[in-house]
């Protein structure tokens, strides 16, 4: 299964991946669309068929149809955290930020280890909605549920910086170095902030 989601830069801010119109993955999904559509129509109560069709629609750029299919898949299996996260991505791309927030939160409540749901929500909060304080809260929640991994702490530090909390930013980068003394991103950001 090909996942479309978020790539996290270890140096600064996360970047949302967007489907690319002409790459091999998109062509592969585009070629499979008729078959996936037929399967979803033939078996409308099949979670797997609806989810697969939704994913193909999303990757090929039909966000509105992907929303319909992801909503159907979510009704069929309301406990699938990954599908809720993917539905959040569709809502985000359609600029329905309230629904995206609900979907991401539902995803990580169902599966607290689903890091992408936290990242997707916090990225939207910090960069799209310009609410870095909300992103800080989201990352703090992620850390409380998943431990203090250097990767999560880097994201938390970035959110602190976006929120104008320089002391907390530096403190969090130092915490990263306690766990990973060779972390170049933390070192570089501490140097940058101390200039």
Image (cartoon, helix red, strand yellow):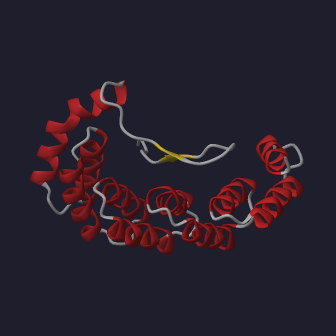
Q: Quadrant of residue 145?
A: bottom right
Give the percent coordinates (x, y) of residue 92: 35, 58
Give the residue at the far front of this rendering: 195
The residue sitting at 46% across, 72% down in the picture is: 105
**Can you say whether 29 is above or below 42 in the image?**
above
**Can you say whether 61 is above or below 66 in the image?**
above
* In-front residue for pair 150/13: 13
In this rendering, position of residue 37 left or right of residue 1: left
* In-front residue for pair 174/37: 174
In this rendering, position of residue 48 left or right of residue 116: left
**Can you say whether 130 is above or below 20 in the image?**
below
The residue sitting at 69% across, 43% down in the picture is: 11
Give the percent coordinates (x, y) of residue 22: 31, 24
In this rendering, position of residue 32 left or right of residue 7: left
Give the percent coordinates (x, y) of residue 113: 58, 64
Q: Quadrant of residue 90?
A: bottom left
* In-front residue for pair 77/63: 63
Q: Quadrant of residue 192?
A: top right
The residue sitting at 66% across, 56% down in the picture is: 155
Q: Quadrant of the N terminus?
A: top left
Give the total of numbered labels: 0
């Amino acid at each position: 299964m090909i996942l479309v989601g978020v790539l996290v830069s270890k140096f600064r801010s996360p970047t949302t991946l967007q489907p690319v119109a002409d790459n091999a993955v998109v062509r592969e999904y585009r070629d499979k669309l008729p078959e996936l559509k037929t399967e979803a129509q033939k078996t409308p109560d099949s979670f797997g068929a609806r989810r697969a069709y939704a994913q193909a629609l999303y990757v090929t750029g039909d966000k509105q149809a992907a929303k319909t299919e992801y909503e159907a898949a979510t009704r069929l299996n309301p406990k699938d955290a990954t599908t809720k996260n993917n539905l959040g991505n569709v809502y985000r791309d359609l600029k329905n930020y309230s629904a995206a927030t609900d979907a991401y939160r539902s995803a990580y409540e169902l599966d607290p280890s689903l890091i992408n749901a936290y990242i997707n929500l916090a990225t939207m909060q910090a960069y799209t909605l310009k609410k870095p304080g909300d992103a800080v809260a989201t990352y703090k929640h992620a850390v409380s549920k998943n431990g203090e991994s250097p990767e999560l702490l880097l994201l938390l530090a970035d959110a602190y910086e976006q929120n104008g909390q320089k002391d907390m930013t530096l403190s969090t980068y130092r915490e990263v170095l306690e766990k990973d003394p060779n972390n170049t991103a933390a070192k570089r950001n501490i140097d940058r902030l101390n200039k």
